[in-house]
Image: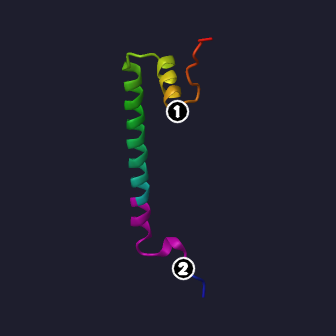
Amino acid sequence: MQPKKLEQYKYFQPIAWTLCLSFAGFVGMLALQVQESFKQLEESSIGFETRLQNIENIVNVNPPQNNVR
């Protein structure tokens, strides 16, 4: 006797559709959040270079150098 295929189980279709729709909702919400983040970046009053420099200073990637001799 052959084992049952996954598609032959009684609850396969409702579970598959629920997972599919849940993933579509997740991707949709993620796209909306990315869009909102881009809008906030466009409306920001400080430039990209300033933001990048601020981040570098916070994590000490490129610490400011003193030119005092």
Q: Residue 51 location, x and y as percent?
A: 47, 22
Element on which disc 1 rests? helix
**The N terminus lies in quadrant:** bottom right
In this picture, is 47 found above or below 38? above
Q: Within the image, what quadrant is residue 63 found in?
A: top right
Pointer 1 local density, CA inside 10 Å: few below 14, some 14–19, many at least 20: few
What segment is highlighted magenta in the picture? 4-18
> Residue type at mark 1?
Val
From the viewer's perspective, tell me whether residue 2 is left or right of residue 17: right
> Residue type at mark 2?
Lys
Element on which disc 2 rests? loop
Res. 50 mark: none
Camera-side residue: 33 or 8?
33
What residue is shown with label 2?
Answer: 4
Residue visible at 42% across and 59% down in the picture: 19
From the viewer's perspective, tell me whether residue 29 is left or right of residue 61: left
Main SS of residues in magenta: helix
What residue is shown with label 1?
Answer: 59
Residue visible at 51% across and 26% down in the picture: 57
